[in-house]
Image (tube, grey):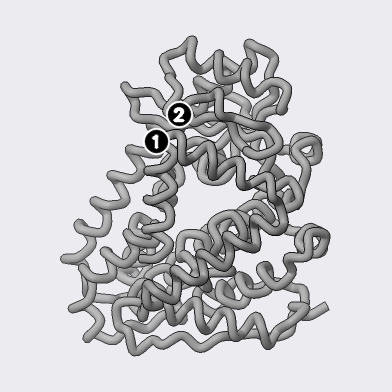
Amino acid sequence: MNRQTAKATPDLSDSTLQLVLALLQARFDPRDVHLDTDLRSTSLQALQLAGEHGVAPALAEGLRQLIRCGLPWQDLQPIFEAVEVSNAQKNATLRRAALSIAQWLDTERIEAVFLKGAAFILEDETDAAWRTTTDLDILVPAEDVARAAEALRANGYRFAMDPSAYRPHLHHHYAPLVNDQTKTFVELHTRLMQDEADDLVCAEEICLRKQTVCCHDQAVSIPCPEHRMIHLIAHAQISNWGYPLRKVWLKDVLDAVELARGQELNWTDINEAFATIGATAQLDGFLAAAENMLGLAVPVALSQPQSARAWAEASIEAISIPERAGITTMRILSHYLQLFARNPARLSIIWQTLRDPARLQLLFDVNRQRTG
């Protein structure tokens, strides 16, 4: 079935956004990317915007592709590539940490599946130099999560937060761990989503359909492509509140395009996962925005193309013209009320957070980010 077109029209009068999108598009196919020479003056602002959206390292490959096609911007290449090289070095550190953790957990006979950015790094021989990754997310069986944490603690990690506050029915990952020497943060997940009602794919199914990749002669597990796409979009739209706040992050869009490139994804499975929890609007909005910005082609029809188009238009426009903080604050408060109404047990999380300075500070920081 051919997908119904649901393109939004971003305000590309913002030359900075235009340059970022052009460079990201050129990563995949530079032939249809034509840059106005006037955009050159916005190159540093483009790097800054891309950094805010977690895609700055990805711009280097797009610039290289366009230079090969005749763009005379060679003098800018070292600046963009320096960002890429720095990120590759960070990812190499994370890859080494991931391989060590995989060995420790295997010794303890604990199944481990590496999620999100870790999966990109482990399957890419160049350590996914384009992908900004801040921590390692690892799915482990719920009954083994405490043992897995102890295995990491026995090898140089410490808890970044008090693990006694962990409640399986409230939290989808254990207390974060950190290695002070390598500055590596680790989250041991027991499921994908914080609210069990929002879990699109159960942990058992992820482990059943996991894939094995060989990284530096070591076998490690990552989710199948469909589960990775489901988690990516659900994390962006539901966990990170992208849909209710009408915000789309270029990092998530780039991840989706990178994942879809060369993969035979079963989009029917992906659609059904979102439909199961009543979140097709969140899926449709993301796909409409991703198609428009980076040309993500999906061979299935959107269930509500008009509303998807409206959401995409608002979210893309917000990249150039951020919504006023007061309006975003009202959206945040409204969404909190909806979350508490759906799951009153979340109130106990707030109570625990108020009693824990570290968690309280994290809550303030997250909501400060949301309001811009």
Residue 96 visible at all: no
Please name whichever residue, 323 or 68, is drawn nearer the observer in this view of the structure.
Answer: 323
Marking on residue 129: none
Residue 35 spot, x, y in % from top left: 32, 82
Image height check: is 272 above or below 295?
above
Q: Determine the CA span between mark 2 and mark 1.
A: 7 Å
Instruction: Report the amino acid beneath label 2.
Output: Met
Residue at mark 2 = 161
Rendered view: 207 above or below 180: below
Say whether marks 2 and 1 touch (CB < 8 Å).
Answer: yes
Place of residue 164 in the rendered image (x, y in percent of width and height, measured from the top left): 55, 23
Image quadrant where residue 238 sits? bottom right
Task: Give coordinates of residue 21: x percent, y percent.
Answer: 41, 74
Q: Earlier in the sequence, mark 2 or mark 1?
A: 2
Number of marks:
2
Looking at the rendered structure, the secondary structure element under dot 1 is helix
Residue that badge 1 annotates: 358
Report whether 349 appears left or right of 70: right
Q: In the rendered view of the protein, which quadrant contains the N terminus? A: bottom right
Amino acid type of the residue that numbered disc 1 sits on in the rendered structure: Ala
